Amino acid sequence: MSQQVKIIGRGTWLDRVASEVVERDRSLGRDLSLIRVESGLGASGLPHIGSVGDAIRSYGVKMALEGLGYKSELIAFSDDLDGFRKVPAGFPDWLNDYIAHPVTRVPDPFDCHKSFGEHVGSLLRASLDQLGIEYTFLSGAEVYKKGLLNEQIKIILENAEVVGNKIKELTGQEKYQSVFPYTPICQNCGRLYTTKVTSYDAARAVVHYKCGTAQIRDKLIQGCGFEGERSITEGEGKLAWKSEFAARWVALDIRFEAYGKDIADSVKVNDWICENVLKHPPPYHAAYEMFQDKAGRKIAKSVGNVLAPQEWLTYASPASLRLLMFKRIVGARNISVDDVPTYMDELDELEASYFSRERDPNAMKDARLRGLYEYSMLTQVPPGPDVHVPYRQVAELALMAPEGAVEEFVTKRLIANGAVKEASQGLATRIGWAARWALDADLRVDRTSEKGPVVQVAAQDWDEKTVASLRAFSEALPRAETPDEIQGAAFGAIRSSGAEPGKFFSAIYQILLGTERGPRLGPYITDAGREVVARKITGALDAKQLGMKKE
């Protein structure tokens, strides 16, 4: 007799994390009337898909906690008292004069916000709003000014020697054995990182500092040489990262925070400070790998390969971006706008499965896929499925459309080849996304030239008979002039090579649309162009052959 599988919540990793947060807090005897999760919002550079992902994942845990019956809140903490480190591409060079100043005291070059920090932070918050992420926003600058971290700052500075020694032990960094983990804003020049605290007067809650020099990226920033005092309660300074997280966690009673593995050392130190210096349990964590570009480089502002969330949302639904974040948390992933069709089609597959009567015999997998769809829809499931047409098919048709009549042209072609029954708002929206994606990705080619396929696919693991059938079909296509003749050429290629029909059609749709299934082949190829499709097939087979030679 098989053992019944216990499914937690909706069966996803979000539910597992939420359950572990609850069990841990229960074992610690903590109040469970409100479980706060946190995400840090960077305010020193342009938002990218990685920075918004932190907040989306934390919101997913919030939804899972609510699904388990607990009240939860996402705190979006803006690091807007951080120093300005680099002028982003496309911003005026005069901003270099403000390097090392707090980002909330750097002018907004576009004059639409009070500061550079507020401008950049508004872009990230706008992305979260567009994605339907609900949060309570806290400005780091205001949190310090209101004194919400004062008690934690005092305790950390009183134990600065212990903290510095532990940082050295855990990370090898010796800096904080001679420097206090607190940086005041120079009251003379307004810089942040150039100041070094030389002593702390606990009775007066005052630091003594000198404004010297700071190495920021590849630049040595010269301070003004001023020497003076600052009260830690006036909001004119901040804790170093290797202690600030801990102060926030305690002051705001944070129970969960995800983090990228690039700051694992900082989290390790803050956990220790939280538990051993501030005498408060640190939050439960989930670590995730950083997104990479197609060259395997981490997506980062400093590398210049940033993929902005607004860019993704120009081409695809908010649910597809949420799916990207909720799908899994372990393992690194290469990501670019080229992946938009993959996640749009995967969301369609999840939705079709969700509303079908069929269930996966594996109860755990069935629950996980249903749960993944529900979380991608923010648990607000529509009454029925939307229109499902392979994204690349719509993109290809959009490239053929006459200027100014894209929606009408694509809709008529999709109805004619049986992909949809009628026009709808959902279809119109998808056409708009796919058309922008196709044009912006420079997919338009001269279809009478030898430039190759419109969409190149990676080599696939097809067997010899499938490869032979694809080759025969590509050779027969120029002679097949009607949809019925194209369909006949496909079955003729299958028969002559002895291939399995299912494998042949699966391979064809992988080449043409990047999916396992697609519309009726004859009408689709008529629309796409027989020569174009033949070049696509040949290109895919050549890629496979090249891959085999390399092996």
Image (cartoon, grey):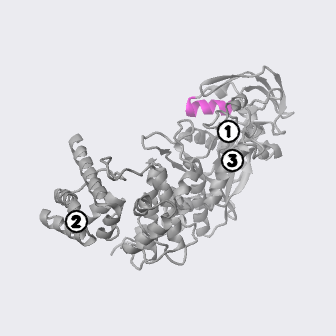
The residue carrying pointer 2 sits among few (fewer than 14), some (14 to 19) or many (20 or more) residues within 10 Å by Cα, namely: some
- 276 or 551, which is in the foreground? 551
- Of circles 1 and 3, the one toward us is 3
Residue 238, by quadrant, is: top right
Q: Main secondary structure of the magenta part?
A: helix
Q: From mark 2 to mark 3, how far is it between C-alphas?
A: 57 Å
Residue 49 position within the rendered picture, expressed as x and y whole percent measured from the top left: 55, 49
Three-letter code for the amino acid on which mark 1 is drawn: Ser
Residue 166 on the magenta segment: yes
Q: Is residue 142 left or right of residue 170?
A: right
* Residue linked to disc 2: 480
Q: Residue at x 22, y 65 (%)?
A: 480
Q: Is residue 224 left or right of residue 133?
A: right
Residue 164, by quadrant, is: top right
Q: Which image quarter holds the C terminus?
A: top left
Magenta stretch, residue numbers: 161-172
Three-letter code for the amino acid on which mark 3 is drawn: Gly
- 226 or 271, which is in the foreground? 226
Residue 501 on the magenta segment: no
Q: Which image quarter holds the N terminus?
A: bottom left
Residue 520 position within the rendered picture, expressed as x and y whole percent measured from the top left: 31, 71
* Residue linked to disc 1: 243
Circle nearer the N terminus (2, 1): 1
- Furthest residue in direction right, as rendered: 204
Q: Residue at x 49, y 74 (%)?
A: 423
- Of circles 2 and 3, the one toward us is 2
